[in-house]
Amino acid sequence: MQSEIDPKLVVFESLTGTGGSRVFYAGALIEGLTLEVRLRSSREEINEAQDQVVDFVERCLAAMPPEERGAFLARLDRGDDFAERLSFGAFLDRLRAMKRRIEVSQLIGEVPAMTAAEHEILATLGIEEETESLFPLGEVLAIQEMLVATSVPLAEAATIIGAEPAKLRQRLEEGYMLGVWLAGHNWRVLAFQLTENGALPGLDMVLEKIPMDINPVGIWAFFTTPQPRLLQHGRMLEPVAWLASGGDPEIVSDLAGSL
């Protein structure tokens, strides 16, 4: 059967002490499925696990009577927070449509001026139109879609880091954690800043050193790119892996200050 289940919207939530992870699709819990996805799983392992989830969901859908299948899809579409899910889903739909438009335009050698709505989408992550010095615009949109799709609702992120939602909201507003601000006054936290045990160690110290004119896609690129100064057992690590493993945050902070 042909379905619209998207592997990129599969998110794993570790179950402390069990060695497994609950599985969510677009914010909705997939009941009856627990997969092994470790904190430091490789991108390939996560991709494979996401594909397994898609296969599982599609097989479930194929076996369901039409009425039950409709209810299942409606539950996936609805998510945990109905008001937030609506704005989040609408935002992703607009972002994908914008990305497709630019990709098609680039194939024919012409990129039309962006509309006010498209500028608003980029502004959600603090991105200006002049992005060629960092990534081509199409790649920026792909990265942004990934960051938004994997972002964590504020209340869930607050539970992970052990903070009151109001305190976390203040950190987001002051720039000591990165998030996505969506229509309807909904914050979502970019997932690379979270670990099984809370916020990424040293995150505040590093973000404080990053110049204010660096947009979140550039910050994400810094945190996920191996750095020569971050050597562990003869291997260069990304800042996010270095900090998660207990590495000295001052070294990462020094690197961040040179961006």
Image (cartoon, helix red, strand yellow):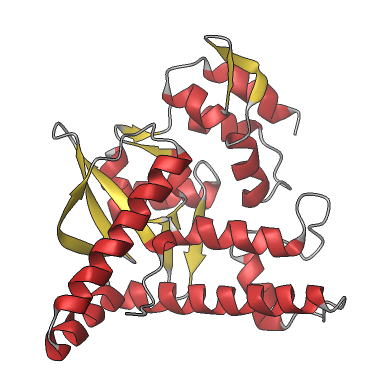
- Please identify the residue farthest to the bottom as the structure is shown: 67
- Please identify the residue farthest to the top as the structure is shown: 233
Q: In front: 2, or 215? A: 2
Q: Position of residue 96 (x, y in %)?
A: 57, 74
Q: Quadrant of residue 63?
A: bottom left
Q: Is residue 9 left or right of residue 197?
A: right
- Please identify the residue farthest to the right as the structure is shown: 109
Q: Quadrant of residue 161?
A: top left
Q: Residue at x 35, y 72 (%)?
A: 84
Q: Is residue 194 left or right of residue 127?
A: left
* Looking at the image, residue 131 lies above or below residue 61: above
Q: Is residue 41 visible?
A: yes
Q: Residue at x 52, y 58 (%)?
A: 146
The total number of labels drawn is 0
Q: Position of residue 27 (x, y in %)?
A: 30, 64
Q: Position of residue 249 (x, y in %)?
A: 53, 20
